[in-house]
Image (cartoon, rainbow, N blue to C red):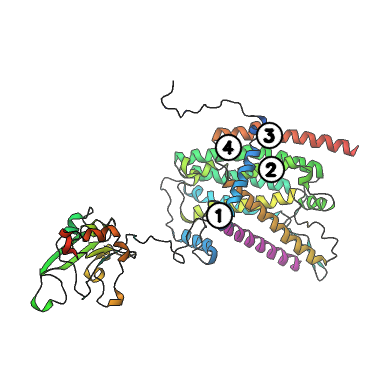
Amino acid sequence: MSLTNRTKVVSKKQMSFIERLYLPAIFAGMGITMKHVFMKKATIKYPEKTREFSEIYRGRHVLKRDDEGRERCTACGLCALACPAEAITMIAAERQPGEEHLYREEKYAKVYEINMLRCIYCGLCESACPKEAIFLTKNLVESEYKRDNFIYGKDKLVEPMEKDKRTDISKRLTPEVLSFKKLPNEKHNI
Amino acid sequence: MLVFLIYKVVLIACILGLSLLIAMYSTLVERKFAGFIQDRFGPDRAGKWGILQPVCDGVKLFFKEEYMPNTADKFLYILGPSLTMLVALLTSAVIPWGGTLSFGGNQFPLQVAGSSVDILYIFAVVSMGVYGVMIGGWASNNKYSLLGAVRASSQMISYELAMGLSTASIIMMSGTLSLQDIVHQQQTSMWNVVYQPLAFLIFFICALAETNRAPFDLPECEGELIGGYHTEYSAMKLGFYLFAEYINMFVSSAIISTLFFGGYHVPFLQHAGLSNNLVTILGTVFLFVKISFFIILFMWVRWTLPRFRYDQLMKLGWKILLPLSLVNLIITGLVTLFLHK
């Protein structure tokens, strides 16, 4: 009586004389090893070659600007709340009268820090952001010698003002995301 | 007299340097070959194709901290690896590396110390190799090292018997103990492996066990014995133990190719009618090709087979290889008797 129907009867045959010699099996094994010497290797020789990433690979973060060059982030804190690793911290500030070309709304993030060592690159901050400000890009985080250099501030996260140096995140805006924005309640995200 | 002295010193220096160089690069070949078998590349960052890797390893070992456990026996602790290295290098003195070079009327045989009892010398020196392991294990003052050393030495002395007996059938066939004469005889008739394939197989398996190479590497495996007799060693002393294993491998390959595969003899070369010196040089090059083939064979076997358990190892040495070599000896004796009648 068996509990599953995946039983296999164990063979209790004695080894034949050829098998007990072990030598034929050893030679067969050596043939397999030699065959592997000439097979294609699985190694990718970094840094001369890099492996392929998918289009929506979650790498380093970027804080985007809108078409007029104003920072989209309003320091609402939803990304920090959503982050499972508590990697994001920020300090908000009020926009002064002469800074309308820098920030979209009256509240902006004076200090915005992500600890790249705590971050698990899950992308929940990107999903939580109501202003389409933070995205994860295909760029990789470079190695540093000190742990403190891994806390990225706004200087490393906000994309540059020049139009040609902006980060392209069009592949992350999938049709599902775009159709979500067309809902009447979500107009403020555009 | 002066010419003779200079030539001997130069020959000794060449052979010493060559065996150290070959042992150094066989560490790299081992790692690259192991990588290729395992579907990866070996080390290839240090210099093109990793050529500078052995240099890096040597420099690393020189810079490591040299310590000695303070309950260890000071003299024996240093003697262990030194003895192993000495014994490994001593065996290369009697191997005929080539024919005879002739410059200006003088003959220069390419053998450091040939005599009529070469094979006896080789076995004497190889038996002394057990001392290095035993002393290393005892001097560490560590019961696991001692256990590893006891296992290693018992393995080495068990397999020496079958090795000696399989060589005895070669000696019976050739009628001489001198390696130079054995090579000469293989030049006229076929290579010895054709007449004694079973002896070759037994000798090869015993050479694997004598040099503590897989599948007989229980004394030095990391999983079961945490390093065995070289647990308490660091830096250059450990480097000596590990390096001596590769030199032993090189010398064993040289002995196998001399005894069974014709040494420096190149088949069909005597018909080409080249000058004597060129034949000698080609013979030496061909000997090194054979040695390289055997070194690759050692590594190939290591990365294919799993390790023997200690009782399986002892059973193989005493209950299977020893009777087989005795049977081989008897058969050789009978055939020699009937052929000479």
Magenta stretch, overall SS = helix
**Residue at mark 2 to residue at mark 3: CA–CA distance:** 11 Å
- Does label 4 or label 1 sit earlier along the sequence? 1
Between disc 1 and disc 3, the foreground one is 1
Q: Residue at x 51, y 46 (%)?
A: B136
**Residue at mark 2 to residue at mark 1: CA–CA distance:** 28 Å
Q: Residue at x 60, y 43 (%)?
A: A29
Q: Which amino acid is tagged 2?
A: Phe
- Does label 2 or label 3 sit earlier along the sequence? 2
Relative to A21, B176 lies left or right: right
- Does label 2 or label 1 sit earlier along the sequence? 1
Is residue B90 in view? Answer: yes
**Residue at mark 1 to residue at mark 3: CA–CA distance:** 35 Å
- Chain letter behind tag 2: B
Q: Are marks 4 and 2 in contact (CB under 8 Å)?
A: no
Do badges 2 and 1 share one subunit?
yes
Q: Which mark is residue B204?
A: none
Q: Which mark is residue B203?
A: 2
Relative to A103, B327 lies left or right: right
Q: Is residue B28 magenta?
A: no
- Does label 3 or label 4 sit earlier along the sequence? 4
Between disc 4 and disc 2, the foreground one is 2
Q: Which residue is mark 3?
A: B322
Q: Which amino acid is tagged 1?
A: Phe
Mark 1 Cα shell of 10 Å, populated few (<14), some (14-19), many (≥20)? many
Q: Residue at x 78, y 33 (%)?
A: B330
Q: Which residue is mark 1?
A: B36
Q: Are marks 1 and 3 in contact (CB under 8 Å)?
A: no
Q: Secondary structure at mark 4?
A: helix
Between disc 4 and disc 1, the foreground one is 1
Q: Are marks 4 and 1 in contact (CB under 8 Å)?
A: no
